[in-house]
Image (cartoon, coloured by chain):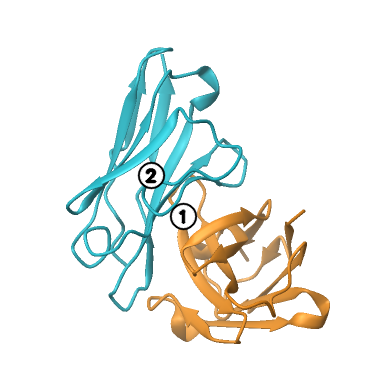
Amino acid sequence: QVTLRESGPALVKPTQTLTLTCTFSGFSLSTSGMCVKWIRQPPGKALEWLARIDWDDDKFYSPSLKTRLTISKDTSKNQVVLTMANMDPVDTATYYCARAVRGVILEYWGQGTLVTVSS
Amino acid sequence: QSALTQPASVSGSPGHSITISCAGTSSDIGGFNYVSWYQQHPGKAPKLMIYDVTNRPSGVSNRFSGSKSGNTASLTISGLQAEDEADYYCSSYTSSSTLFVFGTGTKVTVL
């Protein structure tokens, strides 16, 4: 059974760096073809993909946020970590991680974690 | 990143069929068969309903079907049920620097 769970602070201040952790089970990120993506959804708005890390440690970022994002993995802990620098109130959103096949099929999703950016 | 274009809302009566469109370009939908569809109920995570344009994951009702014509993909829900009321998002691989893009989302209402 594949599960993913996001964790991190519910509230961050403007200009701070957000660190989110995706802890997963039921698969290994060292298996060929596996990858994990981060997606966010501002309240009442559409989904937006942020970053992706592949089994071979290849990393991909949304061009519009690339300068602020860093994605990494700890295969031994079954975790993927996303950091987003210089947080702004417009970054208030529910952040999801998902297991992806071929980088494009988001098979399994975490339940999401709401991050509010406010002073 | 330029999102794929979906109608903001679509509605239908129980038992009827509806179709949601997802318009892209030759760099995404038109150029590749990597279109997926996701269902999202309020307060819940999205759920994969269709992948690779036409394929249904195990456990997804056969009332859901996908297709593509040119640069536009479509999701059809037949035999509409109250539980189908949700937001639906398409997504696609894109050969642009964006790599991956979601649609703008469609709210489905069962009348």
Identified at 38% across, 76% down, the residue is A64
Identified at 75% across, 74% down, the residue is A79
Amino acid at pointer 1: Leu
> Percent from the top left, x then y, of residue A29?
69, 76
Relative to residue B1, is residue B23 depicted above or below?
A: above
Check disc 2 and report the residue beneath it.
Answer: B105
Residue count near mark 1 (Cα–Cα under 10 Å), binned few <14, some 14–19, many ≥20: many
Query: Who's cyan, chain-wise?
Result: B
Q: Do the residues labelled 1 and 2 touch (CB within 8 Å)?
A: yes
CA gap, disc 1 to disc 2? 8 Å
For the N terminus of chain B, the quadrant is bottom left
> Percent from the top left, x then y, of residue A111?
68, 51
Relative to residue A91, is residue A58 depicted above or below?
A: below
Dividing the picture into quadrants, the one containing residue B99 is bottom left
Task: Kindly state the secondary structure of the residue where label 1 is placed.
Answer: loop
Identified at 53% across, 84% down, the residue is A59
Determine whether, in the image, residue B1 is placed left or right of residue B62.
Answer: left
Amino acid at pointer 2: Gly
Check disc 1 and report the residue beneath it.
Answer: A47
For the C terminus of chain B, the quadrant is top left
Label 2 chain ID: B
Q: How many marks?
A: 2
Q: Which residue lies furthest to the right in this view?
A: A77
Q: Are marks 1 and 2 on the same chain?
A: no
Determine whether, in the image, residue B21 is placed left or right of residue A35.
Answer: left
Colour given to chain A in the rendered image? orange
> Percent from the top left, x then y, of residue A58?
54, 86
Of residue B81 and residue A43, the one placed in the foreground of this image is B81
Of residue B13 and residue A15, the one placed in the foreground of this image is B13
Task: Kindly state the secondary structure of the residue where label 2 is placed.
Answer: loop
- Indicate which disc residue B96 carries: none
Label 1 chain ID: A
